[in-house]
Amino acid sequence: MLAVGMVACGSENETPVPIVEATPNSIELSKLAAYESGVFAQSAAEIPAFDTESQRLFVVNAKEGVLDVLDLSQPDQPKKITSIKVDDIAPEAEVNSVAVHNGIVAIAIQAAVKTDPGYVALYQAKDLSKLAHVQVGALPDMLTFTPDGQTLLVANEGETSDDYQVDPEGSVSVISLANLKAPIVRTADFKAFNGREAALREQGIRIFGPKASAAQDFEPEYITVSKDGKTAWVTLQENNALAKIDVAAAKVLAVYPFGFKDHGINGHGLDVSDADGVDGKGKINIQTWANVRGLYMPDAIASFEVAGKTYIVSANEGDARAWGENNPAYFNNDTSQGFVEEWRVKHLVHAKGFDRRLGDDLPAHLRVLAKGAELNPANFAYCGAIAGDAKDCREDHLLGRLNISWTEGYQKNADGTAKLNERGNLVYDHLYSFGTRSVSIWVENDQQTGLELVWDSGDQFEQYIAKHHPEIFNFNHEEAGLDNRSDNKGPEPEGVTLGQIGQKTFAFIGLERVGGIMVYDVSTPASPVFVQYINSRDFKATTAQIEMGQAGDLGPEGLVFIPAKDSPNKKPLLVVGHEVSGSTTIYQVNLK
């Protein structure tokens, strides 16, 4: 696919000659500027979207519950114009996402009570006049237009209430924009999958909310749409799955499992501990771990076409369910007060069982299931496990600090129930951690799984930073500390966007925790090429300086690529919203 423009000719009767965009050998990002909101760690700059005609940048400011409007006519000097407030639509509402197409701005609005239906509002980019608003599902979390701009799709996540008393269904709203002042909403729901939960689990799809139907358990997160606008795919992050949607019919056609990554394979290692160095401090320690598996659980996805085939790029962040995690009643065995699936290995497989953590951090649903848990010594002898005792596997410098999902990996009976050994304990054959610390490329197939992994970056993110920036290896976004995210999703790739330049496609991946952008040339989906890692964070800033907003760009969330033909300075741009530093950063994409 070529990006083209038009050039004037000598006679008005002559056919304009297309300008073909040059295909670079490679690219290099350089930071032009950033707009600083001055608000730290309160999601003051999350999702950006750009309108070409007005040269305005729209940025979600979740902290204020508004959409900030920036003037990007001079990309090296972004300036705030105003903010769009949504109080007239829903009092105390939150703005979650934004998308722009041909001068129309669409905003996803979460109700004050997140389990209530949310809204989508439409505005003119040029004068910010409101066109219409419509009601959609609970917790609209992301939205996107089809390529022709005639349809808007909204991922309604449908998260439970924090005490797990209310669990709305997840869905995707399909909004017809034929009449911008009277949009028509249809709903692609998951009701057809109710009653099929056991079969879906057998396929590898995570349906595990207490007493939840499939429709309640599925939580749509992020949408990408095919080039022809006929098909959409939406991540179900907590379910580790991908839903396929027929846009015209507003119908979910299928749900595919992403599966898992084997961290025991060379090139797929990870650092599992934040306390594996001297005196319990962290150190860089990337290695393979047999029978430790990563759940892909992507947040953002994007898609592109090669030779008529659509490929899906996923940022494999990982996300655990943690409802009621601040409620003491839940950790005192009241299963009605929440649901928490994340726990450290050292607590899960302690020889004295679960009750030693009662009232502290023992997930109530786990205690109902069994008295304790063990590692299968046939699978974990390499770190010291024996029958009835995990031994050194629990140590901080080995697997002890790793956060995993206790809901996965234990032995089961033929009917799917937990299989307890003679000591009344669960026996774990595998340990499943959240996310895979990587970016992947997928394609649909005709097999039962429906998805085929074309390529995965393996442990390249951790390996690259360990080699080139060891001083910030697995830093957190809100504090300075070597290795302090190794036990929990590492660099945490969350956002991804694609940029077409000439005949090449580039992927830009935001690393939420350590910060920065990984860049790959994905033009050949089976063999992408690493291009660059750029991080505009101040590596030397202390935790105190970070908290005062003096550490540069922290916590990249949303990314948007602006092609040269649409760019104010006629150069390709990448805009990144940083939820922690509250900064919106503009990078120029330089062709090489």
Image (cartoon, helix red, strand yellow):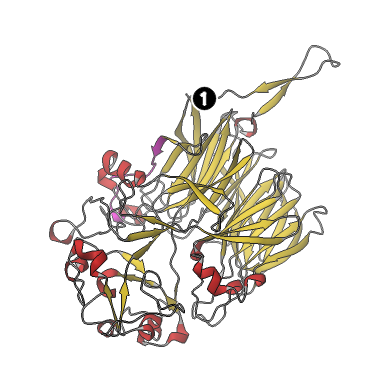
**In the image, is residue 141 above or below residue 368?**
above
Identified at 60% across, 67% down, the residue is 139
Circle 1 SS class: loop
Where's the N terminus, which quadrant? top right
Percent x, y of residue 375: 26, 71
**Viewer-side residue, 18 vs 530:** 530
Q: Residues within 10 Å of mark 1 (few under 14, many from 20)?
A: few
Depth order, front residue of 187/204: 204
| Relative horizontal placement of residue 121, taking residue 65 as reference (left or right) | right
Q: Which residues are magenta?
A: 531-544
Q: Is residue 411 magenta?
A: no
Looking at the picture, how far across and down is residue 220, in whole percent? 58, 63
- Decide if residue 490 is in sight here: yes
Q: How many marks?
A: 1
Q: Residue furthest right?
A: 13
**Residue 143 position (above or below residue 114):** above
Report the side of 118 relative to 366 (left or right).
right
- Outermost residue on the top side: it is 10
Kind of residue indicated by mark 1 = Pro
According to the image, label 1 marks what residue? 24
